[in-house]
Image (tube, rainbow, N blue to C red):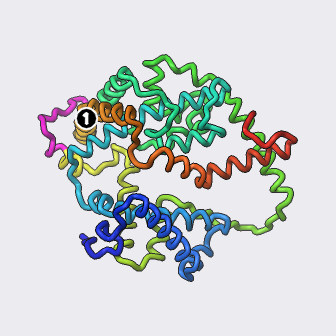
Amino acid sequence: MINFDQFRYNKASLPKDAKEQQKFFDQLEQEFYEEIKNSETAKAYFANYMPGSIENFMKSYANNKVHLLQYYDYYSRIYHEKEISELYYQKKAEEMLQVILQKKLFDIQIRWRAGQLVIDEVDIAYDFNFWGKHIFACPFIPEIRIDELELMKEYLLRFDEDDEADDDYINWQDYDTITQKNEYGDLENLPEWYDFYDSRMGTRMNLLLPNLKGATEDFYLDFSRKSVEMATPVNNSPEPLPYLSGYGESIYDFSKHFEKDKYFKALFKYYNYHQRKENQRPNSEELNTTVEFLLNADRPIYLKSHLTWDKALMAAAKEYRNTKIVEALDFAYEEYLMMKELGLYKGKSLEEIKKEYNKDGIVQFYREKILEGRVQNGESKDFNY
């Protein structure tokens, strides 16, 4: 296990003032970006990928690198520790509150798309994806009600041996994917929690509302795209290079070629382990890890007799885990209400989040292209559509 005491960016060596620390991280991110941009090693690596994807990848990698040095102790602990503490359940309880808020935000998105709502903080549909990443700080989501909290408890404690874990769901606000119907007309991508909530709260009819705003945006985006295609020379290259993604395995693969510092090499390894661990489905967990987990339980664990031994172990682990999360939910809810009443947010402040919105490349891309489409269609350069 690598010791980070001599790490150049050890927490003891970082600025103590919050503003100075943020300034330091911003400057460091730019330095990391410049380092990659001017690296011959990186240039050789990027030669195998689509040129248009390189810029965003370099920015994403630099951002990930700063994130790792900020939380190196967390990723080191996750990588090396197998036991689950009470803090884990408190964290998972907070995540379940976020899941409740994600559903409330998704219902707001559906109504906004249908033209039923006007929201000061929302100009375009992608804004919901942005606020989904800052769900606790989102200013226009109604407060979680006690009946919604109790519904989440019921959801966690129900037993369904074929159920997939919703906490692995990547994008709760991905409207197009969630509302996509299969050949039988079913919403097979609808998260289990959304379906459970709708069945209990009577909100299923929201899914029948028309996507008026989304269709209008698609028209403007298509209009803007076609004008660019007409002005762009045709590329006759028979074999286009692959796109270099700024997420997941692509980040780790590049780090193996680029990083020389032993601490960052270890951190990217830990980060990759963490990502793979987070993406695992419950039924793919190794049985020895499950047994070790159950051995540390603070109460007797009983197996369901109608299941095979391996599935019974998995089900028992999931039931115990969810029971512990339910027990932590009330405290997490009280903390949530207190923070909301005081106008405080976990992580960044609302002002910092709004600044981040203005710097978000995807948000600004959609805003720019939608406005371009409106202008090219002879309409005013605003979001009043």
Q: Quadrant of residue 296?
A: top left
Q: Residue at x 56, y 61 (%)?
A: 245
Q: Position of residue 207 (x, y in %)?
A: 58, 25
* Quarter of the image with the N terminus in it: bottom left
Kindly identify the amino acid type of the residue bearing the numbered disc 1.
Ala
Up/down of 262 relative to 207, above or below? below
Nearest the eye: 343 or 271: 343
Q: Is residue 262 left or right of residue 63?
A: left
* Quarter of the image with the C terminus in it: top right
Residue bounds of the magenta highlight: 294-307
Mark 1 neighbour density, 10 Å: few (under 14) some (14–19) many (20 or more): many
Q: Is residue 117 visible?
A: yes
The prevailing secondary structure element of the residues shown in magenta is loop
Nearest the eye: 68 or 187: 68
Q: Position of residue 73 (x, y in %)?
A: 29, 62
Q: Residue furthest bottom?
A: 40
Q: Is residue 113 left or right of residue 354?
A: right
Q: Residue at x 55, y 42 (%)?
A: 129
Q: Is residue 307 visible?
A: no
Nearest the eye: 239 or 99: 99
Q: Position of residue 66 (x, y in %)?
A: 44, 65
Q: Tell me, yes or no, whether the highlighted magenta stretch contains residue 7.
A: no
Query: What residue does disc 1 label?
Result: 328
Q: Quadrant of residue 162?
A: top left
Q: Residue at x 60, y 29 (%)?
A: 110
Q: Is residue 140 left or right of residue 231?
A: left
- Dot 1 falls on a residue whose secondary structure is helix
Q: Position of residue 123 (x, y in %)?
A: 66, 39
Up/down of 110 relative to 241, above or below? above
Q: Residue furthest top?
A: 202
